[in-house]
Image (cartoon, rainbow, N blue to C red):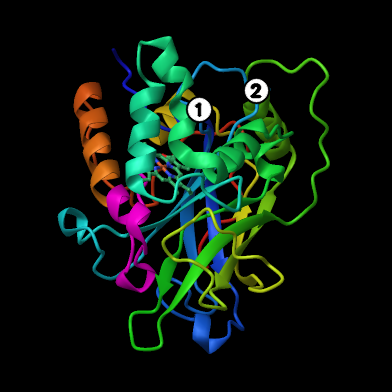
Amino acid sequence: MRPARRDAHPKSHGCVRAEFRVEADLPERLAHGVFVPGAAYSAWIRFSNGNGDATRPDIRGDARGMAIKLTGVPGEKLLPSERDATTQDFILISNPTFFADDPARYATLIERGTSKNPLVAASAPLALGWKGMMIARKMVAKKISSPLETRYWSTVPFSLGSGPDRQAVKYSARPCTPETAPIPTKPGPDYLREAMARTLAAGDACFDFLVQPRAGAWMSVEDSRIEWTELDAPFVKVATITIPRQVFSTPAQDAFGEHLSFTPWHALPEHRPLGGMNRVRRDVYEAVSALRHELNGAERREPSGDELFPSPLPPQRRQLP
Ligand code: HEM
């Protein structure tokens, strides 16, 4: 059935254009890959709900997604099929930990969860074990007032650097301003998109993009159910994401966002995904994106960053210096 949507995170609140500006005085140990001190990239960011049902009202608790795609990134990328792409993706959700520590558990969860037998479907969370179930419960209980006022984490780690001094890091994006908008008393089914539209019609939004270097052997690279606590492994700001004032909710821009493909493997070798979960994501994301595009009869191509969509607002500053 057209349009074929994403298997996970099918409901988009909007795909917005943004600027990702790296700190000018970045410590040398963090200056790898796209983190070139003072560099600026134009970016696309897709905000989403995690649940597989794209018609589910936003007021139901859920894991929210923030998928960031930097454009104009030079250098050979990790995916053999997209070596020459000029994009770097960072994929984040609204929880610091993930509920599955190994791909087999995740696969069982999806298999049982999509079963037509209600008893099998109801038993799906058991696949996660006690710890995973507790994380999933917390994750999907979360209600938010706006995707622009929510914090996001990568949950799984990535390499930073590719030489002998490379280190494992996690990422996070934190709104520059604390949550201010209340959850509406009578929220419409798509109130998160409406909140984003209101904020961005009035002015810019912004996030600090943070890197958390691993600070001890107990901080597991394989088990993303274990939180790397901030107290033990502080986050360091490496960039500012500015989402300029804009009207994003047009049919053309919505369609553009739906046809984007995000994967942690759209990456420079300096940002290589780590751990078993990430290894599985390499093939899964590529395969389901290829199928989705085929079913939709859409071209599958990484964006250049020069895409333009007519906006009723006057154009603002050009994103890159
Ligand atoms: C083995 C583990 C995982 C599997 C099999 C998996 C699977 C998927 C699939 C099939 C999609 C849809 C892709 C598309 O249609 O183009 C997706 C999207 C997504 N996943 Fe995962 N996922 C995994 C782990 C994670 C983790 C650890 C995170 C945490 C950040 C995450 C966050 C997201 C987000 C935010 C999206 C939406 C991206 C967008 O806006 O296009 N996933 N995932």
| Above or below 177: residue 216 | below
Q: CA distance from mark 1 to mark 2?
A: 10 Å
Q: Give amino acid for label 2.
A: Arg
Q: In the image, residue 109 lies at what x, y percent?
A: 40, 32
User: Residue at label 1?
Assistant: 51
**Quarter of the render that holds ligand 1:** top left
In this view of the protein, which residue sits in the foreground, 149 or 134? 134
- Range drawn in magenta: 259-281
Earlier-in-chain disc, 1 versus 2: 1
Q: In the image, residue 48 lies at what x, y percent?
A: 53, 34
Check disc 2 and report its element: helix, strand or loop.
loop
Q: In the image, residue 49 lies at what x, y percent?
A: 54, 31
| Above or below 202: residue 82 | below
Check disc 1 and report its element: helix, strand or loop.
loop
In the image, 126: left or right of 57? left
- Disc ID at residue 60: 2
